[in-house]
Image (cartoon, grey):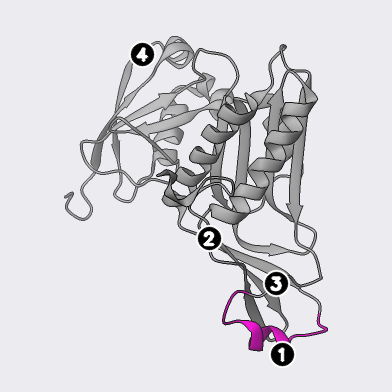
Protein backbone atom coordinates (compact mmCIF):
# COMPACT_ATOMS: atom_id res chain seq x y z
CA UNK A 1 0.00 0.00 0.00
CA UNK A 2 1.28 3.45 -0.85
CA UNK A 3 2.06 5.69 2.12
CA UNK A 4 -0.02 8.89 2.40
CA UNK A 5 1.38 11.65 0.26
CA UNK A 6 3.75 9.36 -1.66
CA UNK A 7 3.41 9.48 -5.44
CA UNK A 8 2.09 6.46 -7.31
CA UNK A 9 4.29 4.99 -10.00
CA UNK A 10 2.09 3.75 -12.83
CA UNK A 11 3.00 2.27 -16.20
CA UNK A 12 0.71 3.17 -19.11
CA UNK A 13 0.71 0.97 -22.22
CA UNK A 14 -0.42 2.21 -25.64
CA UNK A 15 -1.53 0.13 -28.60
CA UNK A 16 -2.25 0.47 -32.32
CA UNK A 17 -3.27 4.01 -33.30
CA UNK A 18 -2.64 5.36 -29.78
CA UNK A 19 0.93 4.02 -29.90
CA UNK A 20 1.52 5.47 -33.35
CA UNK A 21 0.18 8.91 -32.45
CA UNK A 22 2.20 9.15 -29.23
CA UNK A 23 5.30 7.52 -30.68
CA UNK A 24 5.67 5.32 -27.62
CA UNK A 25 4.57 1.88 -26.40
CA UNK A 26 4.82 2.72 -22.72
CA UNK A 27 4.68 5.90 -20.65
CA UNK A 28 5.75 5.90 -16.98
CA UNK A 29 3.82 8.26 -14.75
CA UNK A 30 4.14 9.54 -11.20
CA UNK A 31 0.71 10.52 -9.94
CA UNK A 32 -0.69 11.73 -6.60
CA UNK A 33 -2.53 9.40 -4.22
CA UNK A 34 -6.21 8.97 -5.06
CA UNK A 35 -5.54 9.04 -8.79
CA UNK A 36 -8.01 7.25 -11.09
CA UNK A 37 -7.59 5.78 -14.54
CA UNK A 38 -9.23 8.92 -15.96
CA UNK A 39 -6.59 11.02 -14.21
CA UNK A 40 -3.87 8.86 -15.79
CA UNK A 41 -5.47 9.43 -19.20
CA UNK A 42 -5.48 13.19 -18.58
CA UNK A 43 -1.81 13.10 -17.60
CA UNK A 44 -0.89 11.28 -20.80
CA UNK A 45 -2.99 13.63 -22.93
CA UNK A 46 -1.21 16.58 -21.31
CA UNK A 47 2.03 15.16 -22.75
CA UNK A 48 0.50 14.01 -26.04
CA UNK A 49 -2.53 16.20 -26.92
CA UNK A 50 -2.84 14.39 -30.25
CA UNK A 51 -4.44 11.49 -28.33
CA UNK A 52 -7.38 13.54 -27.00
CA UNK A 53 -9.83 13.02 -29.91
CA UNK A 54 -9.70 9.24 -29.36
CA UNK A 55 -11.30 9.36 -25.90
CA UNK A 56 -14.95 8.58 -26.90
CA UNK A 57 -14.00 5.23 -28.45
CA UNK A 58 -11.42 4.25 -25.84
CA UNK A 59 -11.69 1.55 -23.19
CA UNK A 60 -9.32 0.99 -20.28
CA UNK A 61 -7.72 -1.95 -18.52
CA UNK A 62 -5.97 -2.18 -15.17
CA UNK A 63 -3.51 -5.01 -14.58
CA UNK A 64 -4.91 -7.01 -17.48
CA UNK A 65 -8.64 -6.61 -16.74
CA UNK A 66 -11.08 -4.16 -18.27
CA UNK A 67 -11.82 -1.35 -15.82
CA UNK A 68 -13.95 1.79 -15.59
CA UNK A 69 -12.35 5.21 -15.94
CA UNK A 70 -13.26 5.95 -12.31
CA UNK A 71 -11.21 3.00 -11.00
CA UNK A 72 -8.61 4.15 -8.44
CA UNK A 73 -4.98 3.24 -9.05
CA UNK A 74 -2.34 1.79 -6.75
CA UNK A 75 1.42 1.99 -6.86
CA UNK A 76 2.86 -0.34 -9.49
CA UNK A 77 -0.35 -0.66 -11.54
CA UNK A 78 -0.27 -1.17 -15.28
CA UNK A 79 -2.90 0.81 -17.19
CA UNK A 80 -3.72 0.03 -20.81
CA UNK A 81 -5.53 2.36 -23.19
CA UNK A 82 -7.59 0.13 -25.51
CA UNK A 83 -8.56 1.66 -28.88
CA UNK A 84 -11.25 -0.01 -31.03
CA UNK A 85 -10.33 -3.62 -31.73
CA UNK A 86 -10.45 -5.47 -35.04
CA UNK A 87 -13.43 -7.59 -35.92
CA UNK A 88 -16.03 -5.04 -36.99
CA UNK A 89 -19.05 -3.82 -35.07
CA UNK A 90 -19.75 -4.83 -31.48
CA UNK A 91 -21.70 -8.08 -31.14
CA UNK A 92 -23.23 -7.58 -27.69
CA UNK A 93 -23.64 -4.57 -25.44
CA UNK A 94 -24.88 -5.68 -22.01
CA UNK A 95 -24.62 -2.99 -19.39
CA UNK A 96 -25.97 -1.77 -16.06
CA UNK A 97 -25.37 1.97 -15.85
CA UNK A 98 -25.80 4.46 -13.02
CA UNK A 99 -27.26 7.63 -14.43
CA UNK A 100 -29.36 8.89 -17.34
CA UNK A 101 -29.48 7.18 -20.72
CA UNK A 102 -28.85 9.53 -23.63
CA UNK A 103 -31.91 10.50 -25.66
CA UNK A 104 -29.97 9.26 -28.68
CA UNK A 105 -29.22 5.87 -27.13
CA UNK A 106 -31.12 3.80 -29.73
CA UNK A 107 -29.24 5.47 -32.58
CA UNK A 108 -25.97 5.19 -30.64
CA UNK A 109 -26.47 1.47 -30.08
CA UNK A 110 -27.44 0.94 -33.72
CA UNK A 111 -24.22 2.64 -34.81
CA UNK A 112 -22.21 0.31 -32.59
CA UNK A 113 -24.00 -2.88 -33.64
CA UNK A 114 -25.18 -2.72 -37.23
CA UNK A 115 -23.24 -3.89 -40.27
CA UNK A 116 -23.92 -3.61 -43.98
CA UNK A 117 -25.42 -7.12 -43.84
CA UNK A 118 -28.24 -5.99 -41.54
CA UNK A 119 -31.58 -4.97 -42.96
CA UNK A 120 -33.45 -4.67 -39.66
CA UNK A 121 -32.89 -2.74 -36.45
CA UNK A 122 -35.55 -3.01 -33.73
CA UNK A 123 -35.26 -0.77 -30.70
CA UNK A 124 -37.24 -0.57 -27.47
CA UNK A 125 -37.21 2.09 -24.74
CA UNK A 126 -38.84 1.56 -21.34
CA UNK A 127 -39.93 4.88 -19.79
CA UNK A 128 -41.28 5.97 -16.40
CA UNK A 129 -45.05 6.44 -16.46
CA UNK A 130 -47.44 8.01 -13.94
CA UNK A 131 -49.70 4.97 -13.49
CA UNK A 132 -48.61 2.42 -10.85
CA UNK A 133 -47.86 -1.23 -11.50
CA UNK A 134 -48.37 -4.43 -9.53
CA UNK A 135 -46.90 -4.28 -6.01
CA UNK A 136 -44.38 -6.90 -4.94
CA UNK A 137 -45.55 -9.52 -2.44
CA UNK A 138 -45.85 -7.87 0.97
CA UNK A 139 -46.27 -4.39 -0.49
CA UNK A 140 -50.04 -4.54 -0.93
CA UNK A 141 -50.85 -2.38 2.11
CA UNK A 142 -48.34 0.29 1.13
CA UNK A 143 -49.70 0.26 -2.42
CA UNK A 144 -53.24 0.74 -1.07
CA UNK A 145 -52.05 3.77 0.89
CA UNK A 146 -50.98 5.40 -2.37
CA UNK A 147 -54.05 4.31 -4.36
CA UNK A 148 -55.21 6.98 -6.78
CA UNK A 149 -51.92 8.87 -6.69
CA UNK A 150 -49.54 9.42 -9.58
CA UNK A 151 -46.06 7.94 -9.65
CA UNK A 152 -43.48 10.76 -9.48
CA UNK A 153 -40.37 8.72 -10.36
CA UNK A 154 -38.97 5.22 -10.32
CA UNK A 155 -36.00 3.97 -8.33
CA UNK A 156 -33.87 1.06 -9.53
CA UNK A 157 -31.15 -0.92 -7.84
CA UNK A 158 -29.34 -4.00 -9.11
CA UNK A 159 -26.91 -6.77 -8.26
CA UNK A 160 -24.71 -5.52 -11.10
CA UNK A 161 -22.36 -8.45 -11.66
CA UNK A 162 -25.13 -11.03 -11.41
CA UNK A 163 -27.42 -8.94 -13.62
CA UNK A 164 -24.82 -8.78 -16.39
CA UNK A 165 -24.38 -12.57 -16.21
CA UNK A 166 -28.15 -13.01 -16.58
CA UNK A 167 -28.17 -10.63 -19.55
CA UNK A 168 -25.38 -12.68 -21.12
CA UNK A 169 -27.45 -15.86 -20.68
CA UNK A 170 -30.43 -14.14 -22.31
CA UNK A 171 -28.22 -13.05 -25.21
CA UNK A 172 -27.04 -16.65 -25.63
CA UNK A 173 -30.64 -17.82 -25.77
CA UNK A 174 -31.52 -15.17 -28.36
CA UNK A 175 -28.62 -16.29 -30.54
CA UNK A 176 -29.73 -19.93 -30.28
CA UNK A 177 -33.46 -19.31 -30.81
CA UNK A 178 -33.53 -16.51 -33.36
CA UNK A 179 -30.03 -16.44 -34.84
CA UNK A 180 -29.56 -12.84 -33.69
CA UNK A 181 -25.98 -12.18 -32.59
CA UNK A 182 -25.94 -8.38 -32.43
CA UNK A 183 -27.88 -7.27 -29.37
CA UNK A 184 -27.85 -4.51 -26.78
CA UNK A 185 -29.53 -4.45 -23.38
CA UNK A 186 -28.70 -1.38 -21.30
CA UNK A 187 -30.48 -0.87 -17.96
CA UNK A 188 -30.26 2.19 -15.78
CA UNK A 189 -30.09 2.27 -11.98
CA UNK A 190 -30.83 5.09 -9.57
CA UNK A 191 -33.76 7.50 -9.78
CA UNK A 192 -35.54 7.77 -13.12
CA UNK A 193 -37.91 10.77 -13.39
CA UNK A 194 -41.16 10.70 -15.34
CA UNK A 195 -40.71 10.34 -19.08
CA UNK A 196 -37.07 9.25 -18.89
CA UNK A 197 -35.72 5.91 -20.09
CA UNK A 198 -34.85 3.11 -17.68
CA UNK A 199 -33.94 0.45 -20.26
CA UNK A 200 -32.94 0.32 -23.91
CA UNK A 201 -32.95 -2.80 -26.08
CA UNK A 202 -31.67 -2.98 -29.65
CA UNK A 203 -31.67 -6.11 -31.82
CA UNK A 204 -29.96 -6.06 -35.21
CA UNK A 205 -30.40 -8.76 -37.87
CA UNK A 206 -30.56 -9.26 -41.64
CA UNK A 207 -34.36 -9.73 -41.48
CA UNK A 208 -37.09 -7.99 -39.49
CA UNK A 209 -38.87 -11.03 -38.04
CA UNK A 210 -35.80 -12.23 -36.17
CA UNK A 211 -35.01 -8.71 -34.96
CA UNK A 212 -38.56 -8.16 -33.62
CA UNK A 213 -38.62 -11.52 -31.86
CA UNK A 214 -35.18 -11.00 -30.36
CA UNK A 215 -36.04 -7.55 -29.00
CA UNK A 216 -39.30 -8.79 -27.46
CA UNK A 217 -37.56 -11.77 -25.86
CA UNK A 218 -34.79 -9.55 -24.52
CA UNK A 219 -37.09 -7.13 -22.70
CA UNK A 220 -39.47 -9.82 -21.40
CA UNK A 221 -36.73 -12.05 -20.04
CA UNK A 222 -34.75 -9.15 -18.58
CA UNK A 223 -37.79 -7.98 -16.62
CA UNK A 224 -38.53 -11.50 -15.41
CA UNK A 225 -35.02 -12.77 -14.57
CA UNK A 226 -32.42 -10.05 -14.06
CA UNK A 227 -31.79 -9.11 -10.38
CA UNK A 228 -32.92 -5.52 -10.86
CA UNK A 229 -35.44 -4.08 -8.41
CA UNK A 230 -37.90 -1.25 -9.05
CA UNK A 231 -39.73 1.02 -6.62
CA UNK A 232 -42.45 3.49 -7.53
CA UNK A 233 -41.89 6.74 -5.68
CA UNK A 234 -44.72 8.94 -4.50
CA UNK A 235 -44.74 12.25 -2.68
CA UNK A 236 -44.61 10.64 0.75
CA UNK A 237 -43.34 7.10 0.22
CA UNK A 238 -42.56 4.34 -2.22
CA UNK A 239 -43.79 0.90 -3.25
CA UNK A 240 -41.61 -1.97 -4.47
CA UNK A 241 -42.89 -3.52 -7.68
CA UNK A 242 -42.51 -7.01 -9.11
CA UNK A 243 -42.84 -10.76 -8.80
CA UNK A 244 -40.45 -13.55 -7.72
CA UNK A 245 -37.63 -13.80 -10.25
CA UNK A 246 -37.44 -16.71 -12.66
CA UNK A 247 -34.09 -18.52 -12.94
CA UNK A 248 -34.65 -19.89 -16.47
CA UNK A 249 -36.66 -19.11 -19.61
CA UNK A 250 -40.40 -19.46 -19.20
CA UNK A 251 -40.63 -22.38 -21.62
CA UNK A 252 -37.75 -24.36 -20.04
CA UNK A 253 -38.88 -27.36 -17.91
CA UNK A 254 -37.83 -27.11 -14.26
CA UNK A 255 -36.05 -30.47 -14.44
CA UNK A 256 -33.99 -29.57 -17.54
CA UNK A 257 -30.96 -28.46 -15.54
- Work out how far the residue at label 3 is from the one at label 2, CA to CA, in angstroms: 14 Å
The label nearer to you, 3 versus 1, is 3
Dot placed on the residue nearer the N-terminal end, 2 or 1: 1
Q: Which residues are magenta?
A: 136-149
Instruction: Work out whether residue 138 or residue 187 is closer to the camera in this orientation and state it.
Output: 138
Residue identifier under label 4: 24
Dot placed on the residue nearer the N-terminal end, 3 or 2: 3
**Is the residue under label 4 in contact with that under label 2 (CB below 8 Å)?**
no
Mark drawn on residue 145:
1
The label nearer to you, 4 versus 1, is 1
| Residue 148 to residue 155: above or below | below
Instruction: Work out whether residue 188 or residue 178 is closer to the camera in this orientation and state it.
Output: 178
Dot placed on the residue nearer the N-terminal end, 2 or 4: 4
Residue 146 painted magenta: yes
- Work out how far the residue at label 3 is from the one at label 4, CA to CA, in angstroms: 58 Å
Q: Quadrant of residue 112?
A: top right
The label nearer to you, 3 versus 4, is 3
Mark drawn on residue 245:
2
**Is the residue under label 1 in contact with that under label 3 (CB below 8 Å)?**
no
Amino acid sequence: MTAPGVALRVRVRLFAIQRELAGAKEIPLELPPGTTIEDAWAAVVARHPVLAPGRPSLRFARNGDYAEATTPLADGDEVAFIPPVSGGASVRILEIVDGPLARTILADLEDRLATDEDGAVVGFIGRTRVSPGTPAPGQEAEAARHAGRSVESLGYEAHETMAVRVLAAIADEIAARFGVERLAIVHRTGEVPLGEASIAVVAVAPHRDAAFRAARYAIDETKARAPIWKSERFRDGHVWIGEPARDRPLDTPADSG
